[in-house]
Image (cartoon, rainbow, N blue to C red):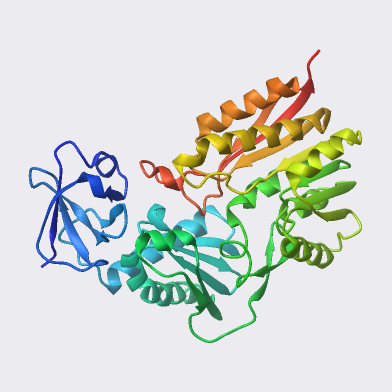
Amino acid sequence: MSAVVTLKKGEGRTLKAGGMWVYDNEIAAIDGTFENGDLVNIHDFDGYPMGRGFINEASKIRIRLMTRNVEQTIDREFLRMRVKNAWDYRKKTVATGCCRLIFGEADFLPGIVVDKFADVLVVESLALGIDRMKETILELAKEVLFADGITIRGVYERSDAKVREQEGMQRHKGFIGEPFDTNVPIEENGVKYLVDVCNGQKTGFFLDQKYNRQSVRRLCSGADVLDCFTHTGSFALNAAAGGAASVLAVDASESGIAQARLNAERNGMQDRVQFVCRDVFDLLPELEQQGRRFDVVILDPPAFTKSRNSVKNAVKGYREINLRGMRLVKDGGFLATCSCSHFMTYELFTQTIAQAARSAHKRLRQAEFRTQAPDHPILWAAQESYYLKFYIFQVCEER
């Protein structure tokens, strides 16, 4: 029998609204015995059944929900249903050559991410309970894909994020199964990349910007483009694919820039894209002093905040980078700018951009607002699943 967790009266509001988490301070009592990572039943203060999830007393997120049915057995067939539902959703919403196959809570498999890069899977496991189910989920993913004629040749684990320590877990990365070449060739939006699933950031490539990268192409025909925080060159190469006359792409990571240059060569774009290894915050004022101006400026920074405690400093960073970016846009040119932190809310990010525009004495005309690609679905009531905000503006001089 599962232990029973009873919520405090008036708590569990997120869970009741459709969310997937129960926090430590929402729990009144636990009846029965359990080990961290075990499945428990959740009841409201009055005994009303709320669902089943796995518990971990090492984490402030004390319980992650697996099902709202307390009678549901969490077995192989249950996990197969979850994995198949996730794949069927992707087939209807995105190009699946490369995609996020499982997106944690938003696919009702909390704490696990699985990315598909051509015929390779990369898994990131961030919660103790789901970590116990990880290999079964991966076996099922391979079976579900094979039924559609897709053979997975290898699996790599990138469970090396610091957040695992908050779950009382060690960080880990390595092969699951037979080793393979971890430089994996992929194609997205017609652009070819070599993805380093072993040493690249996160799982090796940021699939969430797939259609945002594509959206900048039509702005770039004949344009001079500045791509900031280029990582492995994805926005820069999409700009070149859109017919840019020149692209200056900047990142502080030497390994990222080296990979970006290789990606440019794979696409025959090395003559139009110049990659520079510099701190963007240092370079942009220099470009402004030199009188450089661009038809399109792209800002795709890393998350400046990963907690509520650092939001204030993050706002300063976003304001500074957007102000500098706007000053480098020619009158009537375009700015593409984004934030990938869910702590930087839509309202706060929008307000910060508006403040930057006032300081830069620019007028913004919004062309588009976008979020993450559909293979990173946003589960309403699970705020952590909505993190990417992406704007395209026309930047006009004040006069």
Position of 64 compared to 190: left or right? left
Report how many numbered discs are placed on residues in the image.
0
Quarter of the rendering containing residue 80: bottom left
Is residue 371 placed above or below 204 in the rendered structure? above
Question: Residue 290, located in which quarter of the rendered image?
Answer: top right
**Looking at the image, which is closer to me, 344 or 209?**
344
Q: In this rendering, does residue 152 appear at all?
A: no
Q: In the image, is residue 327 above or below residue 141?
A: above
Image quarter hosting the C terminus: top right
Q: Position of residue 32 (x, y in %)?
A: 9, 63
**Residue at point 74% right, 53% down?**
251
Q: Which residue lies most toward the bottom here?
A: 178
Q: Is residue 4 visible?
A: yes
Q: Which residue does the image show at 86% across and 46% down from the upper left?
A: 244
* Left or right relative to 362: residue 102: left
Q: Position of residue 119 (x, y in %)?
A: 58, 74
Give coordinates of residue 116: x percent, y percent: 55, 67
* Residue 322 in picture, x, y percent from top left: 69, 34
Image quarter hosting the N terminus: bottom left
Q: Is residue 223 above or below residue 189?
A: above
- Residue at far top of view: 399
Q: Is residue 316 left or right of residue 47?
A: right
